[in-house]
Image (cartoon, grey):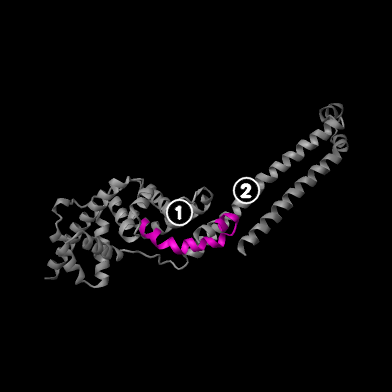
Amino acid sequence: MDTQRTEKFTREILAKSKLELTNPDFSNSLMNKIRKEKKKQIIIHDLVLYSLIFISIDTIIFALLKIMNIKISEITQKTSSFVHIYQYTKPLLFIYLLAIVFILVSILSRTQYKYSKMHN
Amino acid sequence: MERLYLQKIIAGDISKFSYFIEKYKDMAFSIAYRIINDREDAEELVQDSFLKAFKSLHKFRQDSKFSTWFYRIIVNNSLSKLNRDKREFYDVDIDAVSNKVIEDVESVYKGLTISDQQKFINIALHELNVEDRLLLTLFYLNESSIEEISEITDITQENLKMKIHRARKKMYIILERKLKTEIQNLL
């Protein structure tokens, strides 16, 4: 039997060995896993991004404290009363809280937006 | 077409990934099954490999075909799962393969029904070692080129030609033995 014929016959018999996935839900379940993975990637990406923004805001706040010459260590040394510390730092705490809320809302809305875009 | 879809997926349109799933799932399953020999494990492994491919799609440089890159993931994952194939294989004397053997196989094989042909070829492949099964599947079933198989398996092209030749010979020996036994049982 010549090589060409052998090759042809081998190809022919091995074609019979082809296997097929019989699970009809295979593609759907895989696509669902991929969507979940993508959602996870978006959340992780956004968390990193907003953590950087958060750190930047912190840095700005500390810079403002420095400019306004407010020393929290001195305030805490002068009085141990929490009310006093709170009065001094109230505006800063407010900015801080606002930043946290802003970051959380942004993460949620961006994830939602990207996720809806992903499905369309 | 594939390049365009890949760009779209990377840009965020993941629905296009279903094109790759539909196109490559059966061949990926055939390769995984030929290595690990278990349907359920092979199916799970194909899912994991698709997921892995999706996660690392940005690393795919597109200087080779998607199929080559993806089948390499399938082969590596399957071999990792297999760890070490401790099964005893057929002791095959490949020098015993002559044209006569192949002709005998052909004449008996062609007289079988399609389901019996499928049964015997699957039995013969099962008796081969992992590497032989994989190479025959890639070369004859998937019709991959030697260059592509070399990229998928990390075996040099020269070595591959020899290995495929030997694997084919082994398969014929096993087929001949199996078919002989079958004929004897029928008589």
Magenta stretch contains residue B26: yes
Magenta stretch contains residue A58: no
Q: Which is nearer the eye, B148 or A93?
A: B148
Quadrant holding the C terminus of chain A = bottom right
Label 1 and label 2: CA atoms lie apart by 22 Å
Q: Which is nearer the eye, A81 or B41?
A: B41
Residue positioned 48% across, 64% down in the render: A27
Q: Which residues are magenta?
A: B7-31
10 Å crowding of disc 2: few (<14), some (14-19), many (20+): few
10 Å crowding of disc 1: few (<14), some (14-19), many (20+): many
Please tell me the numbered disc located at residue B49: 1
Q: Quick check: marks 1 and 2 in contact, CB under 8 Å?
A: no
Q: Chain of mark 1?
A: B
- As helix, strand or loop, the secondary structure at mark 1 comes to helix
Q: Quadrant of residue A8?
A: bottom left
Q: Residue B107's x, y, as percent?
A: 16, 68
